[in-house]
Image (cartoon, coloured by chain):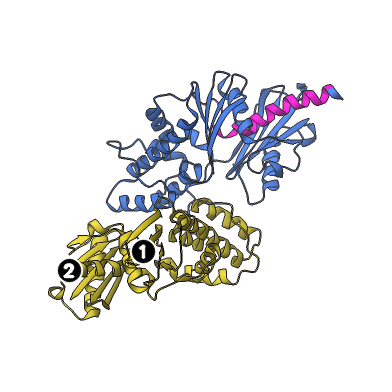
């Protein structure tokens, strides 16, 4: 059986093709302002990499913030449901999922069947999402990747006072003025988002194993801050940004 | 690159007044996170002020604001009998005799600027937004504040002025050049509101319509804060956003109450209140010695 999951994220669109539970194709595109067209493109890329045509597909399920706008879909599931399903399928011992994307942060507690027991999310404020690191990397004039690496080299972590991304940008500028090393500022940035994500995790009462997914999981500096704030290790899958789409493709196989 | 967010920095003094005739000369310096003001009061009356952007160094910003207020008056710093520092950088005013919170100073300043009938002051500053209730003497009776989030603050408006390439002082007027009032921008977070606005521009919305949507979102945002404390008339708006009629008119519409017209620059309320407190403190000091 071949199924497809489309994750219509606020910043990027991810598509996963599954054959009998195995990932055989993937596609990713920036959502931009024409998310439907971008989804079509990611969909074509994924089909091509899987070497299949649309007629071969048995079911397509969408997820993500823009899921109502996804092309070709039979039905859609929530991001929370998609995340839990995807993660527990990969890691049967996972009980908590943390997902940090461009514009949203989520903590989900689930059981061994991937059923959601509780969840908390922030979608109102950039301070607990990837957008925060992006804004800070602009203020520091480094790439998000460099920001993560720099953070690991911090020797003198300084706390950040501002919560709001807009105010934090001004704070970063004045820290730079005061000759605070960029490494320490990066660490402050990651510690700040980590503390926000951990408060979501506490709300749901997180328990191990904790699996961390979403695009921000690529940021090694943030992972370090998150583990310190959670006081436990997190597991990160190979392609953390695709897990939502993977979960949707699994859901398509079930229906 | 043009800096659309940049508002006018200026100074003023009352040329009809001879400060040498005054018995009590005091000053208030408000070092805010975005702007700094110095106000000089002679015998209980406003005499001079300056209004400028805060630099990266608070003591330096305080000194510059004070020097600029004094400029062209012939007055020197040591002619001033008592100086009160206020604002988030109030403990960093090197030449001040006392620091007083900006909440107390704002209420006191508004009492002078709008008269003793003012009971609710909404201060929409650069990095925070406060609602202050006060009595007929300008004494604080209740307050609520948001200093955690840029939505509803001057910084949020600066971000939008830059994004839309509209000089910040023209935002208010331009926001009324729309055929019909658009719905407010739906994202609260300034970062997300920016993405939303970019999308609206892509859809072909004119800049005036986008800024109208943002002004009404900002107005809507502060209503929640106002409701926490409750609005008692008379009502006044201080801080930089007090000059933005795009936000002020929409807010008035939403709460059904008119704000008192501003006779003074709305940004000087804190420093003015500080200088007025300094008048009392100087009197006390003189009485003791």
Q: Is residue B263 magenta?
A: yes
Q: Is residue A119 left or right of residue B78?
A: left
Q: Chain of mark 1?
A: A
Q: Is residue A13 visible?
A: no
Q: Quadrant of the C terminus of chain B?
A: top right
Q: Could you tell me which residue is drawn at 61 percent across and 57 percent down?
A: A159
Residue A111, which numbered label?
1
Q: Secondary structure at mark 2?
A: strand
Q: Is residue A164 left or right of residue A255?
A: right
Which picture quadrant has residue B133? top right
Dot 1 crowding, Cα within 10 Å, few <14, some 14–19, many 20+:
some
Residues beneath discs 2 and 1 located on the same chain: yes
**Where does residue B159 sit, x and y in percent of width and height?**
46, 49
Sequence-wise first label, 2 or 1: 2
The part of the chain drawn in magenta is B262-287
Nearer to me, A109 or B231: A109
Query: In the image, which lettered chain appears yellow?
Result: A
Q: Could you tell me which residue is drawn at 43 percent across and 32 percent down?
A: B248
Residue A59, which numbered label?
2
Q: Could you tell me which residue is drawn at 23 percent across and 79 percent down?
A: A50
Relative to B150, is A225 above or below?
Answer: below
- Most prominent secondary structure in the magenta stretch? helix
Q: Colour of chain B?
A: blue
Q: Secondary structure at mark 1?
A: loop
**Where does residue A195 sit, x and y in percent of width and height?**
52, 57
């Amino acid at each position: 059986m071949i199924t497809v999951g489309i994750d219509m994220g606020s910043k990027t669109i991810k598509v996963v093709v599954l054959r009998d539970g195995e990932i055989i194709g993937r596609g990713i595109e920036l959502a931009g302002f024409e998310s439907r067209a971008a989804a079509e493109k990611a969909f074509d890329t994924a089909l091509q990499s899987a070497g299949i045509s649309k007629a071969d597909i048995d079911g397509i399920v969408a997820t993500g913030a823009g899921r109502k706008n996804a092309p070709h879909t039979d039905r859609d599931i929530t991001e929370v449901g998609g995340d839990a399903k995807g993660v527990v399928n990969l890691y049967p011992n996972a009980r908590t999922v943390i997902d940090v994307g461009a514009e949203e942060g989520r903590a989900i507690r689930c059981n061994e069947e991937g059923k959601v027991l509780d969840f908390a999310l922030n979608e109102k404020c950039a301070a607990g999402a990837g957008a925060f690191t992006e804004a800070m990397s602009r203020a520091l004039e480094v790439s998000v990747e460099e920001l993560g690496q720099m953070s690991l080299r911090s020797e003198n972590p300084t706390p950040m006072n501002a919560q709001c991304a807009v105010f934090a940008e001004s704070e970063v500028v004045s820290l730079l003025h005061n000759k605070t090393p960029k490494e320490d500022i990066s660490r402050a940035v990651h510690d700040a988002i980590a503390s926000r994500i951990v408060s979501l995790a506490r709300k749901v009462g997180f328990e191990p194993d904790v699996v961390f997914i979403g695009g921000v999981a690529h940021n090694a500096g943030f992972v370090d801050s998150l583990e310190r704030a959670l006081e436990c290790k997190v597991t990160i899958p190979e392609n953390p940004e695709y897990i939502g789409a993977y979960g949707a493709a699994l859901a398509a196989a079930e229906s | 690159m043009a800096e659309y967010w940049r508002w006018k920095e200026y100074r003023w003094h009352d040329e009809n007044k001879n400060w040498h005739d005054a018995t009590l000369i005091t000053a208030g310096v408000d070092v805010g996170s975005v702007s700094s003001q110095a106000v000089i009061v002679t015998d209980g009356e406003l005499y001079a002020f300056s209004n400028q952007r805060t630099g990266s160094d608070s003591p330096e910003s305080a000194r510059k604001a004070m020097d600029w207020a004094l400029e062209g008056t012939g007055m020197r710093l040591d002619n001033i009998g008592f100086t009160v520092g206020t604002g988030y950088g109030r403990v960093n005013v090197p030449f001040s005799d006392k620091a007083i919170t900006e909440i107390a100073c704002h209420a006191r300043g508004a009492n002078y600027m709008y008269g003793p009938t003012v009971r609710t002051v909404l201060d929409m500053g650069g990095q925070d937004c406060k609602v202050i209730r006060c009595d007929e003497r300008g004494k604080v009776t209740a307050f609520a504040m948001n200093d955690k989030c840029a939505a509803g603050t001057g910084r949020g408006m600066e971000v939008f002025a830059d994004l839309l390439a509209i000089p910040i002082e023209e935002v208010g007027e331009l926001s009324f050049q729309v055929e019909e009032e658009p719905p407010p921008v739906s994202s609260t977070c300034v970062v997300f509101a920016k993405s939303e606005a970019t999308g609206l521009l892509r859809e072909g919305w004119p800049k005036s319509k986008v800024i109208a949507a943002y002004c009404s979102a900002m107005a809507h945002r502060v209503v929640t804060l106002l409701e926490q404390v409750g609005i008692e008339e008379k009502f006044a708006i201080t801080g930089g956003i007090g000059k933005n009629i795009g936000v002020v008119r929409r807010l008035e519409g939403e709460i059904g109450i008119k704000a008192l017209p501003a006779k003074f620059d709305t940004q000087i309320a804190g420093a003015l209140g500080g200088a007025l407190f300094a008048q009392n403190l100087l009197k006390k000091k003189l009485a003791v010695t």
